[in-house]
Image (cartoon, grey):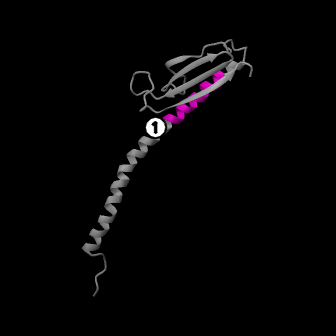
């Protein structure tokens, strides 16, 4: 009678093939979770930059807001409003004549120094507003 099943050698060869792939997958899962968290922070920072840009753009274009083009929109290292209260935002305003160049930087603060570090996930947006637009 012929026995059915795998031999010990076949089981060992199969284990040697599957084991390295399983180790790679186990190492990839935590890395993918870290990248997911970082990309979520970058997306939120980008949304905050866009929100700030739209607010400043509207204020520059509207005289009824009370701020207008002549206002200095510089804002340094403060926390933003909800739903972005865990992010830091910095706005620099460089006005030269009829051209205003504004840079908005937002990031997830992890170093505790309110300065954007290279390791902190974030985004930066630069735009210009012309007085006559």
Foreground: 105 or 10?
Answer: 105
Q: Classify residue 2 as left or right of residue 87.
A: left
Q: Main secondary structure of the magenta part?
A: helix
Camera-nearest residue between 28 and 115: 115
Furthest-right residue in this view: 132
Secondary structure beneath dot 1 equals: helix
Q: Residue at x 42, y 43 (%)?
A: 33
Residue nearer the viewer, 50 or 26 = 50
Residue 26's spot in the image, x, y percent? 35, 52
Relative to 112, does residue 23 appear above or below in the rendering?
below
Q: Quadrant of residue 37?
A: top left
Q: Is residue 11 above or below residue 69?
A: below
Q: Is residue 44 magenta?
A: yes
Q: Position of residue 65 (x, y in %)?
A: 69, 14
Q: Name the residue furthest left.
A: 8
Taking depth in this image into account, of 93 and 121 the one nearest to the observer is 93
Q: Residue furthest bottom?
A: 1
Q: Quadrant of the N terminus?
A: bottom left
**In the visual, does 133 lie left or right of 116?**
right
Task: Return the residue at label 1.
Answer: 38
At 54% from the left edge and 17% from the top edge, which residue is drawn? Answer: 75
Answer with the quarter of the image where residue 120 lies. top left
Locate residue 68, reporting x and y percent.
68, 14
Residue 93 point in image, percent of width and height: 58, 18
Query: Quick one: label 1, few (<14), some, or many (20+) residues within 10 Å?
Result: some
Vertical side of 81 occupied by 22: above or below: below
Write down the region rendered in magenta. 41-57
The residue drawn where x is 39% and y is 23% is 112
For the C terminus, which image quadrant?
top right
Q: Is residue 43 magenta?
A: yes
Identity of the residue drawn at 46% across and 33% down = 121
């Amino acid at each position: 009678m012929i026995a059915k099943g795998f031999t010990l050698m076949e089981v060992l060869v199969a284990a040697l093939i599957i084991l390295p792939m399983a180790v790679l997958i186990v190492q990839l899962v935590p890395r993918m979770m870290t990248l997911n968290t970082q990309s979520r922070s970058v997306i939120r920072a980008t949304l905050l930059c866009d929100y700030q840009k739209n607010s400043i753009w509207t204020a520059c274009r509207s005289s009824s807001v009370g701020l207008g083009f002549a206002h200095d929109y510089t804002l340094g290292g403060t926390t933003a409003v909800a739903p972005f209260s865990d992010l830091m935002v910095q706005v620099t305003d460089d006005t030269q004549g009829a051209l205003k160049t504004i840079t908005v930087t937002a990031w997830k603060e992890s170093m505790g120094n309110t300065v954007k570090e290279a390791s902190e996930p974030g985004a930066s947006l630069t735009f210009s507003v012309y007085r006559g637009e």
